Image (spheres, helix red, strand yellow):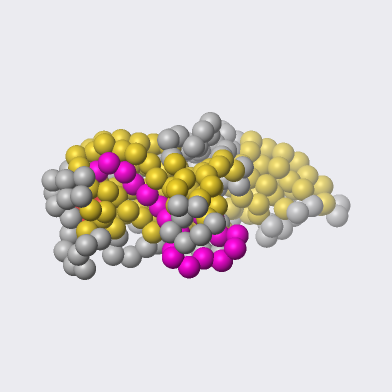
């Protein structure tokens, strides 16, 4: 097992940290959650590291990149009036097995709506319910487009023979000043993901008076990682889960002075847990 160690002295006590790249999934989750082979087609994968990647703001919205991101940059949509949003042009035939996965968060907004336009039916499609944002941090969102309904219908599901030409996220009709929502790690894909994320790499630990700052590289996955689980083992005691993070960093403010080991592993949007290759 590769380790990273640092020394820190606080109120006369030495703090030594060992940061490792992962934890055996069986230690923290049921073995059934661990994935195998996968049959997935990815149409769009966007991290917004360089640009807004084709998204267009509309109806009184402003789209821009922000450093308030899970890793590098994210797409922020500031909404100046109701129904403001952002749209991505796409060209995808067929709804069966089609999914949208991403991380989201918002300010002065509980949730953002989603539409996928079907040019065959000449109608927008939408989810029966929208994912509510967590009060703090990133919210993982997974939508099954073949379970959407047409906007013109109150029941049923979309046709299997759809031809999607856009996907759009938008604010509700009534909003407060300063309303915005942010997108990160957007993936549009088809199929059942059974492949777990790869091992987390680049894990670093830095001690300060505020606590232990952990950081790591984004996990590689055939779709995308949606969350990271952090476990701590004081001295030689067993590892215990201490936190989850949607970002590639976390500050441990509860660690007592002494010797600690850390494990971080990734979880994808279909709850598959990365293994430790130590």
* Residue plotted at (13% across, 46% down): 161
Of 250 and 185, nearer the camera is 185
Q: Horizontal placement of 213 versus 128: left or right?
A: right
Of 51 and 226, nearer the camera is 51
Of 204 and 161, nearer the camera is 161
* Residue plotted at (26% across, 54% down): 124
Q: Horizontal placement of 96 versus 60: left or right?
A: left
Q: Position of residue 72 (x, y in %)?
A: 57, 38
Residue 214 in which image quadrant: top right
Residue extending furthest toward the right: 12
* Residue plotted at (34% across, 39% down): 89
Q: Position of residue 98 (x, y in %)?
A: 24, 46
Q: Position of residue 151 (x, y in %)?
A: 25, 60
Query: Would you say residue 229 is visible in this rendering?
Result: no
* Residue plotted at (26% across, 55% down): 125
Q: Horizontal placement of 19 versus 278: left or right?
A: right
Q: Assess whether residue 176 is covered by the magenta stretch.
A: yes
Q: Assess whether residue 210 is covered by the magenta stretch.
A: no
Of 183 and 210, nearer the camera is 183
Q: Position of residue 35 (x, y in %)?
A: 30, 45
Q: Horizontal placement of 194 versus 241: left or right?
A: left
Relative to 211, residue 51 above or below: above
How many marks the image carries: the answer is: 0
Per the rendered image, the range of residues in magenta is 164-181
Residue 155 in which image quadrant: bottom left
Relative to 256, residue 45 above or below: above
Query: Would you say residue 202 is visible in this rendering?
Result: yes
């Amino acid at each position: 097992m590769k380790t990273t160690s640092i020394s820190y002295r606080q109120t006369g006590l030495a703090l030594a940290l060992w940061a490792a790249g992962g934890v055996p999934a069986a230690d923290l989750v049921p073995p059934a959650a661990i994935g195998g082979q996968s049959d997935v087609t990815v149409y769009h994968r966007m991290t917004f590291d360089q640009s807004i990647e084709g998204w267009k703001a509309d109806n009184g919205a402003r789209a821009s990149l922000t450093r308030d991101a899970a890793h590098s940059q994210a797409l922020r949509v500031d909404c100046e009036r109701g129904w403001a949003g952002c749209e991505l042009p796409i060209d995808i035939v067929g709804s069966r097995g089609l999914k949208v996965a991403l991380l989201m968060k918002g300010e002065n907004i509980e949730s953002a709506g989603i539409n996928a336009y079907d040019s065959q039916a000449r109608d927008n499609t939408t989810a029966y319910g929208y994912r509510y944002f967590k009060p703090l941090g990133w919210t993982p969102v997974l939508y099954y487009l073949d379970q959407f309904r047409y906007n013109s219908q109150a029941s049923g599901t979309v046709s299997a023979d759809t031809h999607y030409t856009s996907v759009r996220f938008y604010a509700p009709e009534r909003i407060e000043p300063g309303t915005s929502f942010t997108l990160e790690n957007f993936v549009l894909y088809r199929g059942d993901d059974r492949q777990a994320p790869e091992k987390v790499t680049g894990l670093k630990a830095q001690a300060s008076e505020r606590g232990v700052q952990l950081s790591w590289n984004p996990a590689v996955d055939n779709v995308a990682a949606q969350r990271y689980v952090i476990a701590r083992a004081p001295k030689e005691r067993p590892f215990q889960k201490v936190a989850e993070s949607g970002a590639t960093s976390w500050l441990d403010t509860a660690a007592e002075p002494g010797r600690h080991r850390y494990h971080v592993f990734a979880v994808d949007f279909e709850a598959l847990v990365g293994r430790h290759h130590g």
